[in-house]
Amino acid sequence: MKPVPGSRRRSIAAVPSLAHTRRLAVHAVVACCASAALAATNAVDVGEVTFSRDIAPIVQRSCQRCHQPDSVAPMSLMTYDQVRPYARSILRRTHMGAVAGVMPPWFIERDIGIQEYKNDPSLNEEELAKIETWVKNGAPEGDPADLPPPLPLDDSSKWTIGEPDLITVLGEVTLEGDAPDWWGEIPPVPVGNTEDRYVAAVEIREVNDVLSRSGGSERKTVGGRFIFHHMIWSTVVADSEDDLRDDPQRRDSASFTSWPVHEVGRNADIFDPEAGRLLAANSTVVSNSVHLHSNGRDTTSHLEIGWKFHPKGYQPKYRRALRSFGDAVDIDIAAMEPNQQLHAYLVLPEHTKITSFEPHLHAPGARMCLEFIWGTHIETLTCSGYDHNWVLGYEYADDHEPLLPKGAILHITGFMDNSPSNRNVPDPRNWQGSGNRSVSNMFIDLGHGVALSDEQFVEEVRERRRSLDVGPNDHVLGCPLCNVIGDQTAEPAEAPAPAPPGDDDTGSGSGS
Ligand code: HEC
């Protein structure tokens, strides 16, 4: 079997036997990753390692967006002198595996499912091995002449999408240190765009006065830094006051676009390049569901929305597929138990390219897996750890988005840790049920996708076969029809050879 890009490291999942994949999805990976990651890195020989030559580039790429002055992290990791005192802590926090606490915060499990994601800041085995060797050898500085040019310390380095084309600043709110959770509507704010633009990426940052106040440097956790837990929001073109209400009837009409929910610790959203979302001229940001959660001190704060546009004249090819599924009814989490499961299912109403996975749990959430079921075929697409301080979405890289036929069933499994080992749970002696507050629970996949017509689906599958150079015996994760829908545009060079006797050629239909 020829290795297919995308299933490189996946000898397990590359040919999923039904029972095997299922078992892995359900049991195997819960406690695997810390030791697996350490074991794997030992195998890589990285030679002599210095900060200037080997570690600084890693820290620049994966850490400095947060570990810079006046940013979300408690300390800067910009220079050798700043990094050196944290060497042992850095070794520990980078080698934890896909569990709460790992740095950078990114929880995709490496031993199952699709491994290619956009803007993936996580460290590969070689980088982990370099950190390990460097720390074990006493964290030497090396020759400062080897340092890469420093990252610019301007505002642009704080946006993962790069410098936004437009920034919309929302209104300021003040929440007292002892205030209860608050939900409500915020006053509408004009976006500031005077023409129709299709959006390629959007990112939201909370900007507040936590660090500039006395004692700010003690705010060492994400929970201590922010007050916006979430904002569910849309943009509307308003002719009257009435238009400024979030009216489900108008959703995703030309003058009304809903956008991915903002969450604490959330990363940016990059839309499928062929499914940019419309930001109509003179739009206004509206939200009737902002959730504020006090961080323990009086805080004044606002959100900033950074927009990246497609070039003028761009037209999207695909429509977005609505997908938000979970189970808010049957959440029943026992006290003092570490490994409890929740399940939810969704039958896809149309052919779908799944462009992202976004597990949404609350404090007891430790992990979530997404699999699909199509006939007798069951395959795990992604498993990720979960930390309610970092509510992340994972966008599949181009050529690796699952391509699933209408009727396929998506299945999410949530893994809940309501035991003393989960530091996000204030008191695990309590039973936990469903609800909106930060102290009750949710179980949802908020990921995105695009809907495909029959023709578009066939075209996408063919394109996938071509770009990954799929042969008749290859299996592509997340593309159950990649071996069935052949490349009919290729002329057969000669008449196909007859199948050898006894060889059941199930006819992949491949022209390759
Ligand atoms: C998305 C923002 C972000 C990124 C990226 C990030 N960090 Fe952090 N880091 C934080 C925050 C916030 C904290 C404090 C909360 C916590 O401890 O989890 C933290 C804490 C830490 C700590 C613990 C500090 C202590 O007191 O011992 C270490 C070590 C660390 N980070 C190292 C790294 C390294 C190394 C990288 C890159 C490989 C990295 N971080 C990437 C935000 C980030």
Image (spheres, rainbow, N blue to C red):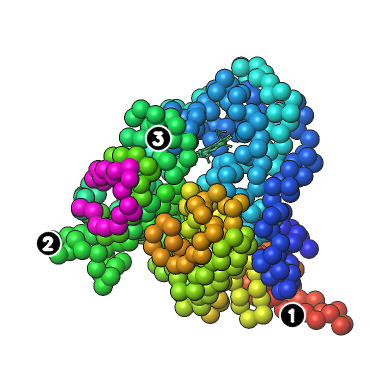
Disc 3 CB within 8 Å of nearest ligand 1 atom: no
Task: Tell me if residue 56 comes above or below residue 501 in the rendering.
Answer: above
Q: Earlier in the sequence, mark 3 or mark 1?
A: 3
Distance from the alpha carbon under mark 3 to that under mark 1? 54 Å
Residue 506: give its label.
1
Instruction: Name the residue located 48 percent from the left edge and 32 percent from the top edge.
Output: 74
The residue type indicated by label 3 comes to Ser
Give the structural element (helix, strand or loop) at label 3. helix
Instruction: Name the residue located 21 percent from the left edge and 63 percent from the top edge.
Output: 245
Q: Quadrant of ligand 1?
A: top right
Give the structural element (helix, strand or loop) at label 2. loop
Q: Position of residue 260 (x, y in %)?
A: 39, 57
Task: Tell me if residue 213 comes above or below residue 269 in the rendering.
Answer: above
Of the pair 230 and 395, the residue shown nearer to us: 230
Instruction: Name the residue located 52 percent from the left edge and 46 percent from the top edge.
Output: 119
Q: Earlier in the sequence, mark 3 or mark 2?
A: 3
Answer with the quarter of the image where residue 177 lies: top left
Instruction: Name the residue located 74 percent from the left edge and 80 percent from the top edge.
Output: 506
Distance from the alpha carbon under mark 1 to that under mark 2? 61 Å
Which residue carries the number 3 mark? Answer: 156
